[in-house]
Amino acid sequence: MTPFLERLRAAFGPGAGRKLALDVPLGLLLAIAGTMALAAKAAGPPWERGPGNGPPGPPDGFGPGAGPPPWADIDLPVLPLVCVAAVAVCVALRRIWPRSAFVASAAACTVFVGAAGFHGPILAGMLLTLYTMASRMAPREWLPWTAAGLPLLLTVRFDQSYLGLLEADTYLLFIPYTAMMVAAAALGATVRGRREGRRREHDQALRRSAYEERLRIAREVHDVVGHSLSVINMQAGVAMHVLDKRPDRARESLDAIRRTSKDALEELRGTLAVFREGAAGTAGDRAPLPGLDRVGDLAAGMASAGVSVEVHTEGEQAVPPAAVDHAAYRIVQEALTNVARHAPGASASVRIAYERGEVAVEIEDDGPRIAGPGPAEGSGIAGMRERARAVGGNLHAGPRPDGGFAVRARLPLGAPRSGR
């Protein structure tokens, strides 16, 4: 591409080719209509274009011996033709330079009326540039130009004294022309308002999606890191306690710490991969999110940390949707992490019941009895409740009357349901 074309493309801006492809034919159509209107005005009424008498013969311009066509003697004025061409160019460039196109078309329309004595199709070109300017610019940017262009609508006549400004017809025509300008500007402002509204809704949807994704990642990181660090902390305490007396137990604890940290790192890599460039293209290469089929492994890991966990499955086992399956796993994981953190040495039981249309997950422990209404709800319980609500389920958590703590969640096996 030559430097001239590059500068021209930079001046026109992005999408200039598509805009010109649509607007140039419209400008040519306006130029043809304006020229035809000038020709009709110059030719005069039909009853004045020929003698109207005489013997019948071939019409002018047809057949042998025919005379010149009726438009051969029409002398089109140059200045109105230049104005028509100027308005046609403004229409063709209206979406590239909207304000300049309106100003130039308004001035050309004024000169055209002064020279030709009528508006004709050229007025439509000016109204079109006004509509484009109002639909693409803020009101504070185009209102002053429109107000300055209103006096140009006065039908001044170069062939009359005082340009016809002392004639009443000049001001009577100003009223409908002003109404047409107001209508064109209002239509353009309405179109711009709707476009801006759709853009704001799109931006809000993107921000909401980004917030929900950040919230999801925060929950994932909290669950993975919280559970893993709790297990690692307990195993490290066991290792330090038996390091001198039973080195074999210390080795087992260190091995459990290594496995737990390795699993946690792998899950964190998968969770945080969405921040990497091109993560969407590698989503299929990441390990699937953990579900209820891995609750047994989770219970075994807790047993190595000193928390005995029993898992019971009831009902005809079904395959939940991926989101429900993952939410149920995270609820079990967070509940067991709370047992290890707040009731060390306690035993826990996990009950997974597949019922009609939903899966019930219950986690109970036999920790010490909690006096009063129970501890204040922390981020762990709030996160479990958000996970259940996100897939259309519900969750209840609180101390048991005979001691310990219980978490009960009911999640739908089908599509997420609302209003629960």
Image (cartoon, rainbow, N blue to C red):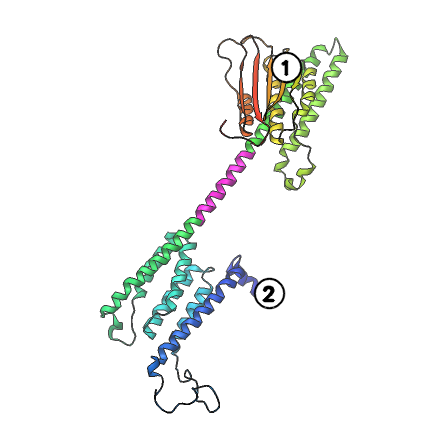
Front residue of this view, candidates 236 and 418: 418
Front residue of this view, candidates 50 and 160: 50
Discs 1/2, front? 1
Q: Is residue 398 magenta?
A: no
Relative image position of residue 261 (x, y in whole percent): 69, 24
Is 225 situated left or right of 155 in this image?
right
Please tell me in which quadrant of the rendered image residue 393 appears: top right
CA distance separating discs 1 and 2: 76 Å
> How many circles with numbers are drawn on the protein?
2
Relative image position of residue 93 (x, y in whole percent): 46, 63
Relative image position of residue 269 (x, y in whole percent): 66, 32
Residue plotted at (38% across, 64% down): 126
**Which callout, 1 or 2, points at the residue further toward the start of the chain?**
2
Front residue of this view, candidates 392 and 170: 392
Q: Which residues lie in the magenta part?
A: 195-213
Picture layout, residue 109 above or below residue 261: below
Which residue, given by chain and number where applicable, does mark 1 sit on?
A: 349
Relative image position of residue 354 (x, y in whole percent): 62, 23
Which residue, given by chain and number where applicable, does mark 2 sit on?
A: 2
Disc 2 marks which amino acid? Thr
| Quadrant for the N terminus in the image | bottom right
Picture layout, residue 271 above or below residue 109: above
Disc 1 marks which amino acid? Ser
What is the crowding at mark 2: few (fewer than 14 residues within 10 Å), some, or many (at least 20)? few
Question: Contact, CB < 8 Å: mark 1 with mark 2?
Answer: no
